[in-house]
Image (cartoon, rainbow, N blue to C red):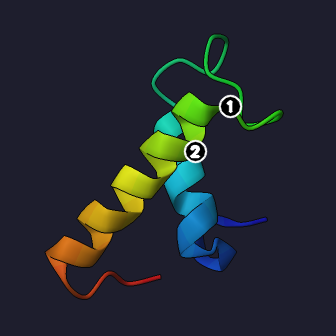
Amino acid sequence: VSANQLSRYQAAQLAVVLPNPYKIQPVPMTNYVQNRVSWVLRQMQNLGHVAL
């Protein structure tokens, strides 16, 4: 999927995994990753309009 086709959820997952992709795996979705994705999505909402 190209960057301009990512959903907000996919973009949040990528933001969570990218700092350490060898340690933080998106599959299987752990509680830690799910909580961080939820946090990132809330932050995106708090920022207002996000171009996605």
Which residue shows up at 32% across the image and 81% down it?
50
Q: Secondary structure at mark 1?
A: loop
Kindly give the residue lying farthest to the front in the view shown: 31
x, y percent for residue 31? 60, 34
Nearer the observer, 14 or 32: 32
Residue 13 in the image, given as x and y percentages of width and height: 58, 49
Residue 18 pos. (x, y %) = 52, 32
- State whether residue 7 is above or below residue 48: above
- Residue 48, given in percent of the width and then of the height, sits at 19, 84
Tell me the quarter of the picture where residue 7 sits: bottom right
Identify which residue is drawn at 49% across, 38% down.
16
Q: Is residue 3 above or below residue 7?
A: above
**In the image, 50: left or right of 32?**
left
Image quadrant in which you'd find residue 41:
bottom left
- Secondary structure category for the residue under label 2: helix
Above or below, 35 relative to 42: above
What residue appears at the point 63 percent right and 61 percent down from the top-left corner? 10
Left or right: residue 37 compared with residue 44: right
Determine which residue is flagged by label 1.
Answer: 30
Q: Residues within 10 Å of mark 2 (few under 14, many from 20)?
A: some
Q: Which residue is mark 2?
A: 34
The kind of residue tagged 2 is: Gln
Q: Residue at x 67, y 77 (%)?
A: 5
- Nearer to us in this view, 24 or 34: 34
Say which amino acid is labelled 1. Answer: Thr
Disc 1 versus disc 2: distance between alpha carbons? 6 Å
Is any part of residue 7 visible from this angle?
yes
Whether residues under marks 1 and 2 lie with C-beta atoms below 8 angstroms apart, the answer is yes
Q: Residues within 10 Å of mark 1 (few under 14, many from 20)?
A: few
- Number of numbered labels in the structure image: 2
